[in-house]
Image (cartoon, rainbow, N blue to C red):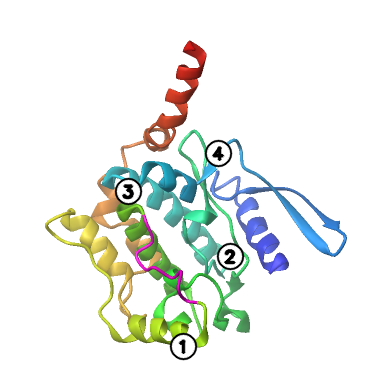
Amino acid sequence: MLIASLDGLHDLESSITSVPHTGVQVVDAFLNRLEVMLVLDDGGGRYLHEILNVKGNVPEQHVSIILRQVLHALDYLHSRKMRIHNDIHPSNLLVLRSGEVRLSGFWFSSKTQTSQSQRFAGRYGYMAPERLLGLECGFASDVWSVGMLTLELLLGRPFFDTSELYDAKSIFEFKKHIVEENSPSLSRQEYSEGLCLFVDACLIKNIKLRATVPGLRSKEFITKYEALQNSFFGRWANRQQVLKYFEMKGS
């Protein structure tokens, strides 16, 4: 897992000249008795799950800005490095004050040509059906995770409550539900058609029909907000901290 994490971060770090600001930067790694400590540079930012805890659900235009950057990083990993991330979720997305989103959490990542892509590991609520079944995974598994990430951003909470998955029986029932029941979807009455279509494209169970990362980048929900800079999201995400700063300064 440590090697996978370092390899994944290195893959993104090596892209800095052509694809800037896509991965969390490694500062150091050292042994602490029998434990390996990995030091990452948070750049003064916060991980996305922390922002969700404070802000709750995220407006559509900000969701689009977040996903635009996540897809940008995944496109590079898939097309240039042949790497599957396998663990896309808010705790692995660092948000800087500028609104830049950087990818981390490569513990379960793998190259597509290795047997590790079949490992049943990671967070159940974001796993694609083929991954839950222990089948060979590919880039399409990351696309499913992007769909689940989108739902969590919009709802302000994970779509599936996996807190009760603590034994073999409960895990089996969860797998059965994901594989046999209809894929999660959004209400057309509450969300825009472009957003609903984006989620539907991510959460197709048939991997041959599921969208690709380049295909998602060209979806109307992403292109619609292309003119909005990352800083637009950054101001929204950090508004509470800014207000607290001025309150403290005034007192």
The Cα–Cα distance between marks 4 and 2, rounded to whole angstroms, is: 26 Å
Q: Callout 3, which amino acid?
A: Asn
Q: Is residue 184 above or below residue 73?
A: below
First along the sequence among labels 3 and 4: 4
152 part of magenta stretch: no
Q: Is residue 135 visible?
A: no
Q: Residue at x 55, y 39 (%)?
A: 45
Residue matched to label 1? 169
Q: Quadrant of residue 32?
A: bottom right
Residue matched to label 3? 57
The Cα–Cα distance between marks 4 and 1, rounded to whole angstroms, is: 39 Å
- Picture coordinates of residue 140 (x, y %)? 42, 73
Residue matched to label 2? 81
First along the sequence among labels 3 and 1: 3
Which mark is nearer the camera, 4 or 1? 1
Q: Residue at x 30, y 87 (%)?
A: 180
Residue matched to label 4? 45
Q: Is residue 149 above or below residue 52?
A: below
Overall secondary structure of the magenta section: loop
Q: With 183 as the anchor, is 114 left or right in this view?
A: right
Which mark is nearer the camera, 4 or 2? 4
Q: Callout 4, which amino acid?
A: Gly
Tell me the tag on residue 196.
Answer: none
Q: Quadrant of residue 61?
A: top left
